[in-house]
Amino acid sequence: MITTFANALNTGLRRALEDDPKVVLMGEDIGKLGGVFRVTDTLQKDFGNNRVIDTPLAESGIVGTAFGMALRGYRPVCEIQFDGFVYPAFDQIVSQVAKIHYRTKGKVVAPITIRIPFGGGIGSVEHHSESPEAYFAHTAGLRVVTPSNPSDAYHLVRQAIALDDPVIFFEPKRRYWDKGEVDFDAPPELPMGRARVCRTGADATLVAYGGTVATALTAAKIAAEEGHSLEVIDLRSLAPIDFDTIEESVDKTGRLVIVHEAPVFGGLGAEIAARITERCFYHLESPVLRVGGFDIPYPPAKLEKHHLPDADRILAAVDRSLAA
């Protein structure tokens, strides 16, 4: 069926609650209100306030409580209302949640899913449009994933909740209202850690994730009208990263452009560029290029269109790569 990204997430959460009585949802205003973006709409009404829990405005308390529940056999799913609000919970996530499995030599698991709306494009105020994914991808012990379309939103959230590892689940908030085909009864098309080739091409590879995948596909469509064939890869998983799929593509195209909303400096694009340069050195026809946000705090809403990568900036990078 055709549905929105937000509704696909809602259905995935609903199925998880139905399948396992140990799954509980926790977050600010997720119950009666249904969350800021209405992702959890009607779930408290249907499953009760012991399964869908409205918490105080205290992110460290949300994740700390979830950690304790996970140690007692529950599968908590935390919602952080906005990306910029996750930092009070950063200590719990990187110091406790990410490390308990390693510290106990595998005897204790922490099956916690932490949902975080991230990225810009909706005209929000300060601390509501950030891209903190690199902080968490850098932390050993965490899985980090981000869907880019409704089908992946549904399947990835169910896979994340079922996993015994802690998962940081980034949701590109400007895609909540995008629509797409979702088969709610089909198995996942890909395992959680695998990237997807969204569009095949021969002249250059575009790698993107989350909210920038649609932008990369738009750029590839424009490039096709200009006679250039671009392959587009949706990472889906940011930790671990499916380097094999990227390598296979770059071995074919000889060129790579990486796109993300986060600032270029120290972003995930740097790690991908370094790894692919090592693995594909003799196949690369030009340097790996990155297109991302500028190295500034996220700008006011009226200026964010200049900050976020768009098709023009992506195609400018493609032109530089093809000219090299």
Image: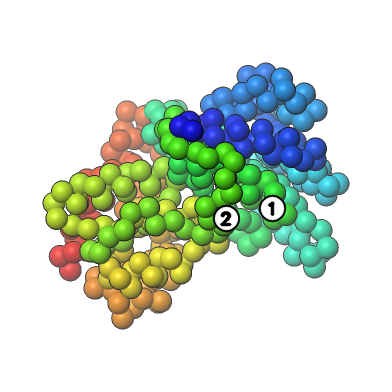
Disc 1, disc 2: CB below 8 Å?
A: yes
What is the quadrant of residue 270 in the picture? Answer: bottom left
Question: For residue 71, which numbered disc appears in the image?
Answer: none
Q: Residue furthest right?
A: 72
Q: Assess disc 1: are there few (<14), some (14-19) or many (≥20) residues with their C-alpha within 10 Å of its C-alpha.
A: some
Residue type at mark 1?
Leu
At x 75%, y 52%, the residue is 110
Does residue 85 show up?
no
Residue type at mark 2?
Met
Q: CA distance from mark 1 to mark 2?
A: 10 Å
Q: Position of residue 255 (x, y in %)?
A: 27, 67
Q: Assess disc 2: are there few (<14), some (14-19) or many (≥20) residues with their C-alpha within 10 Å of its C-alpha.
A: many
Left or right of 305 in this view: 143 = right
At x 24%, y 70%, the residue is 286
At x 46%, y 69%, the residue is 244
Q: Which residue bears the numbered disc 2?
A: 192
Which numbered disc, 1 or 2, marks the residue that appears first in the sequence?
1
At x 40%, y 77%, the residue is 278
Q: Is residue 300 above or below residue 271?
A: above
Left or right of 119 in this view: 307 = left
